[in-house]
Amino acid sequence: MTTSSTPPRRRDAARTRQLLLDAARRRFATNGYAETTVRDIADEAGVNVALISRYFESKEGLFEAALTTSFAELRAAAGDVTPGEVPETIARMAVGQSTAGGPSHSLLLILRSSGDERADRIRLRFLHMFAEKMAQAASMRGGDPDILRAQILLSTAIGVTLLRATNLEPLASASAEDLTTPLRDVVEALIKKSA
């Protein structure tokens, strides 16, 4: 009887979970919730599909974790910005400087994740929370008109990101600096009207 000199490979749960989460974020952002299968995600992550149930319980649980991560990333990018920093923050997020210069997967994930009623409820909850964060960052003081204005800012950021992803020029190749002045005009117009 021969014994192998190679010890059994230990599973790195944290690494496996992160591989699944990263693959899910890319797939959900690119293909949307309905078109993404758990098998696609597991294959891209290079792991057994059963591990999705182990770490996330279900496709829905994985989607919620992907949105949570994306929202945390967007919130960290927004930070505690002053009203004057909002245009630069939106420009950086739209350009996706944290994703090697490509469109922001976080914004695309939030935008393209429709097609399933449960997924849409999760997505809408996160969009509302992010609009509230933007309202605070822009020093908008509560009430429906302020949330509406924050949602307009959010829709501008998502629209810029989506059109960049479709390679609409010159928007697709615009830098964060190129986007800041027009975004500043939008933010200033909204803040002036809400004051």
Image (cartoon, helix red, strand yellow):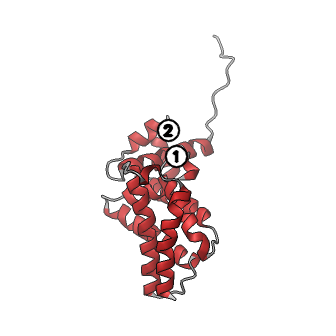
Q: Does residue 54 lie above or below 191 as drawn?
A: above
- The amino acid marked with disc number 1 is Asp
Identify the residue at horizontal 51%, vertical 86% (top origin).
142
Seen in the picture, residue 36 relative to 179 is either above or below; the reply is: above
Task: Return the x and y of residue 184 as percentages of the image width and height.
Answer: 52, 70
Could you classify mark 1 by the number of other residues whose Cα lies within 10 Å: few (under 14), some (14-19), or many (20 or more)? some
Whichever of labels 1 and 2 marks the residue nearer the N terminus, that label is 1
Residue 60 image label: none
Q: Secondary structure at mark 2?
A: helix
Residue at image position (52%, 46%) is 22
Q: Which residue is at 37% across, 61% downward?
A: 119
Query: Where is residue 136, by image quadrant?
Result: bottom right
Q: CA distance from mark 1 to mark 2?
A: 8 Å
- Figure label count: 2
Amino acid of disc 2: Ala
Mark identifier at residue 45: 2
